[in-house]
């Protein structure tokens, strides 16, 4: 089946840009190769290349280019087919054993094997396979996958390399003149045992063209220009924070997350935040800084002093003075990426930041403040390789925003390291800041939310219906495929008379829809079971049989249609480009496919920080840094929302930083850490791009579910951040999401509505009755439901009727 025109167009949009997401961690000078040649190809990701993570991040594309396919299409001859065949057999056996073990664990725990398997991925197996005679040129592709529902482990085959991988990688390094270690991963692995390898490329997981992108990089047709968006620690460093606890997880590190911790305590990771090499070399000239009111303008000359074309990322960090509040050694304040520069070519990068965005949160006074002292401006190519460019001197402390403490208190005091020395040269330019330029902003916590006439006319029953998604049935709701309007979409709003439902599709790396479907008088139906094969195998065979009998299959004469979507780079890889224009382009691509397939809201992007590198969903999250997260999310949002009536849903609001027991995990975190780190990216995206929707998170914050925290949803999100769109829950399925006896029971639908949550998703008859009963009992006000309904109706009025998958293929 040939590619459709839209698929060709979207692949072409991505093809020439993917090397921007790849990070060259080590460069020995052997690459790029001058021409295709005979090649020895090894590793778990050579043939079983990973294009993205599992769970809601999966995308059903028509095709996907593996590394093996990409290299062969570029003209390489792979001479290790027998090795790859043998590895496939070992891998398949290991996965079968893993499934059997999970089923046994589920039996012992008296739980569903299917739910236990959600997000669970087997470690890469040990193996004994001879390398043969690899010749002069070899590539080893080390692959890892993770996903929604399970976290990564500090074990061999996951965060650690297996003994087999270490043995073969080191052997190839010593035996081959040209050897490249490729990392097809969505996050860090501990490379300590193989750091002697000369050439290491973090390819990441780049969507449909992953294998083709590697071939382009190996041949020098594209130059990797990515920088790490998260610190790469050793296994010992990765396990140093409290993470993955059964119920209460304490964020004791406070604001010292990622590079903020490493830089502040003076400890060196494997690779620092912002780090990345290129085939070429760059030299940064002397930076110039200019102050205008609260803004600081920067000009930094960049010169390509190497032998290849390439792009450089210039990063600006600021060391905030410690006073009443302790401070990290430095924090990212701004960044800019050069154009592709030819050898010898120069460019002056101009960019800026606002000092208001460097304010710290003082929980005692419930205010954002800039304390008096020297704000040291550092410019460099990563968080370690920086030079002091200027000192911004504030003679007195200023309060820039008065708010309310809102999030409760944890049962500990935040970590605070002793301050590192911050020596300043006498030659460093000093720029004086005027305190009078900093005005104190106050927040109105009782804004007027006008009620739409259409909302006021709805009956109590209709308001209760509208506060819940359209009721999905059975497994379709569990696996996020509850929509009846667009096959495979995650869900939709209730369909009241005269109001078209709002259709929502999952997938932060593209739209997640059912690839094959058919239509009859009752709607659209998947021409397959409404559950991924990875989960289906964990159901008992009799249950599988019943599902097949109960599922609707195309009748005689029914035309099977296709809705293939384009898988874009995972968010973690997109952030590694440090290029908002590329994020906007990817958003434009997704928005175009939303128009094509009749999707109104994309349940992405995810703005949670990569607090721990062990979080199984980090591939969906941009970075450990809130500024980089906010900038990339805002660009992606603008790309989607340039399409009229289409919107994004930024998620998961907030502190959703582990998958283990995620629906009843309690994040104990200080008000300061929440505001300076975990909420800041959301605030930036809302301010800069006005996303149409926000999704709350499963977890609790300091003992209360986020979806029921009015102080967070109304006070912070709406009043402080100015969000005016739809607020929905994550998919809360009655029964099974939170086990009986859990310390923290599931959120109640009526309490979600009372907190200002517009939609309880995916919805059920029980959820509807819960809201209606609370309304009739006087526990929930009709006015609140009318306000919530107004936001849903306002978006629905903006969204155009769906195009109904125009021009799709037919079987």
Image: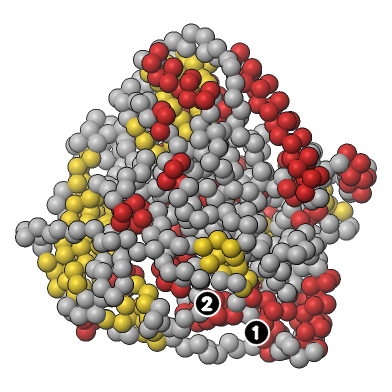
Residue with the most extreme front position: 412
Dividing the picture into quadrants, the one containing residue 90 is top right
Of the two numbered discs 2 and 1 in the rendering, the one whose residue sits closer to the viewer = 2
Going 27% across and 57% down the picture, which residue do you hit? 316
- The front one of 639 and 274 is 274
Q: Position of residue 697 (x, y in %)?
A: 61, 65
| Residue 454 against residue 591 in the figure, above or below | below
Q: Position of residue 33 (x, y in %)?
A: 37, 21
Q: Which mark is residue 408?
A: 2
- The answer to whether 769 appears left or right of 156 in the picture is right
* Element class at badge 1: helix
Q: Which mark is residue 532?
A: none
Mark 1 is surrounded, within 10 Å at the Cα level, by few (under 14), some (14 to 19) or many (20 or more) other residues, namely some
- The front one of 337 and 163 is 163
- The answer to whether 761 appears left or right of 369 in the picture is right
- The answer to whether 768 appears left or right of 783 in the picture is right
- The front one of 586 and 722 is 722
- The answer to whether 807 appears left or right of 14 in the picture is right
Going 34% across and 72% down the picture, which residue do you hit? 360
Q: Which quarter of the image is occupied by the N terminus?
A: top right
Residue, disc 1: 787
Q: Position of residue 367 (x, y in %)?
A: 38, 81
Measure the C-alpha gap from mark 2 to mark 1: 26 Å
């Amino acid at each position: 089946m040939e590619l459709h025109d839209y698929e060709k167009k979207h692949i072409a949009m991505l093809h020439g840009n993917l090397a921007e997401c790849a990070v060259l961690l080590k460069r020995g000078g052997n690459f790029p190769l001058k021409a295709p040649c005979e090649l020895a190809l090894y590793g778990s990701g050579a043939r079983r290349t990973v294009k993205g993570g599992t769970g809601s991040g999966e995308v059903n594309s028509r095709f996907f280019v593996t590394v093996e396919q990409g290299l062969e299409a570029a003209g390489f001859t792979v001479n290790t087919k027998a090795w790859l065949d043998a590895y496939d057999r070992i891998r398949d056996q290991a996965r079968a054993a893993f499934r059997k073990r999970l089923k046994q664990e589920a039996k012992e725990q008296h739980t569903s094997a299917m739910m236990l398997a959600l997000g669970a991925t087997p470690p890469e197996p040990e193996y004994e396979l001879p390398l043969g005679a690899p010749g002069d040129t070899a590539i080893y592709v080390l692959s890892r996958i993770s996903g929604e529902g399970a976290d990564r482990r500090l074990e061999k085959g996951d965060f650690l390399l297996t003994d087999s991988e270490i043995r073969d990688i080191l052997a190839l390094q010593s035996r081959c003149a040209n050897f490249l270690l490729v990392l097809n991963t969505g996050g860090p692995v501990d490379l300590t045992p193989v750091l002697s390898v000369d050439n290491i490329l973090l390819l990441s997981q780049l969507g449909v063209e992953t294998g083709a992108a590697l071939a382009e990089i190996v041949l020098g047709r594209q130059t990797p220009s990515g920088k790490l968006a998260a610190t790469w620690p050793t296994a010992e460093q990765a396990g140093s924070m409290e993470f993955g606890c059964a119920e209460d997880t304490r964020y004791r590190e406070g604001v010292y997350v990622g590079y903020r911790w490493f830089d502040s305590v003076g400890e060196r990771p494997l690779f620092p935040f912002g780090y990345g090499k290129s085939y070429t070399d760059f030299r940064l000239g002397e930076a110039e800084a200019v102050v205008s009111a609260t803004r600081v303008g920067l000009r930094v000359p960049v010169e390509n002093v190497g032998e290849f074309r390439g792009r450089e990322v210039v990063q600006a960090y600021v060391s905030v003075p410690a006073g009443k509040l302790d401070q990290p050694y430095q924090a990212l304040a701004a960044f800019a990426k050069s154009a592709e520069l030819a050898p010898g070519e120069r460019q002056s990068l101009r960019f800026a930041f606002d000092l208001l965005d460097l304010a710290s949160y003082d929980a005692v006074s419930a205010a954002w403040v800039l304390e008096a002292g020297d704000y040291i401006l550092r410019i460099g190519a990563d968080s370690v390789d920086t030079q002091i460019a200027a000192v911004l001197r504030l003679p007195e402390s200023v309060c820039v925003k008065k708010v309310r403490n809102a999030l409760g208190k944890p049962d500990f005091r935040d970590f605070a390291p002793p301050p590192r020395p911050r020596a300043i040269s006498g030659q460093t330019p000093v720029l004086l800041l005027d305190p009078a330029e900093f005005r104190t902003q106050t927040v109105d916590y009782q804004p007027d939310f006008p009620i739409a006439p259409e909302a006021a006319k709805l009956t109590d029953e209709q308001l209760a219906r509208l506060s819940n998604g359209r009721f999905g049935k059975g497994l379709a709701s569990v696996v996020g495929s509850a929509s009846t309007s667009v096959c495979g979409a995650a869900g939709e709003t209730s369909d009241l008379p005269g109001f078209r439902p709002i259709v929502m599709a999952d997938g932060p790396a593209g739209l997640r829809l059912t690839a094959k479907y058919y239509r009859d008088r009752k709607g659209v139906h998947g021409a397959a079971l409404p559950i991924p094969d990875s989960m289906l195998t964990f159901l008992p065979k009799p249950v599988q049989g019943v599902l097949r009998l109960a599922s609707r299959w195309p009748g005689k004469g029914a035309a099977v249609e296709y809705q293939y979507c384009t898988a874009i780079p995972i968010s973690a890889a997109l952030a590694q480009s440090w290029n908002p224009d590329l994020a906007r382009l990817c958003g434009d691509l997704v928005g175009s496919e939303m128009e094509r397939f009749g999707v109104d809201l994309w349940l992405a992007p995810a703005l949670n920080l990569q607090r721990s590198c062990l979080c199984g969903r980090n591939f969906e999250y941009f970075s450990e840094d809130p500024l980089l997260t906010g900038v990339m999310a805002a660009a992606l949002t603008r790309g989607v929302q340039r399409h009229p009536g289409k919107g994004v849903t930024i998620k998961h609001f907030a502190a959703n930083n582990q998958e283990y027991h995620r629906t009843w995990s309690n994040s104990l975190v200080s008000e300061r850490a929440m505001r300076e780190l975990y909420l800041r990216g959301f605030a930036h995206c809302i301010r800069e791009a006005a996303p149409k929707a926000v999704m709350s998170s499963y977890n609790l914050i300091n003992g209360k579910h986020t979806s029921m925290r009015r102080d967070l949803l109304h006070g912070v999100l709406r009043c402080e951040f100015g969000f005016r769109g739809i607020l929905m829950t994550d998919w809360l399925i009655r029964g099974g999401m939170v086990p009986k006896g859990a310390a923290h029971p599931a959120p109640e639908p009526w309490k979600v509505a009372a907190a200002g949550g517009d939609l309880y998703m995916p919805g059920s008859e029980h959820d509807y009755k819960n809201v209606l009963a609370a309304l009739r009992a006087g526990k929930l006000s009709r006015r609140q439901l009318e306000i919530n309904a107004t936001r849903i109706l306002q978006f629905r009025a903006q969204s155009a009727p769906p195009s109904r998958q125009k021009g799709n293929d037919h079987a």
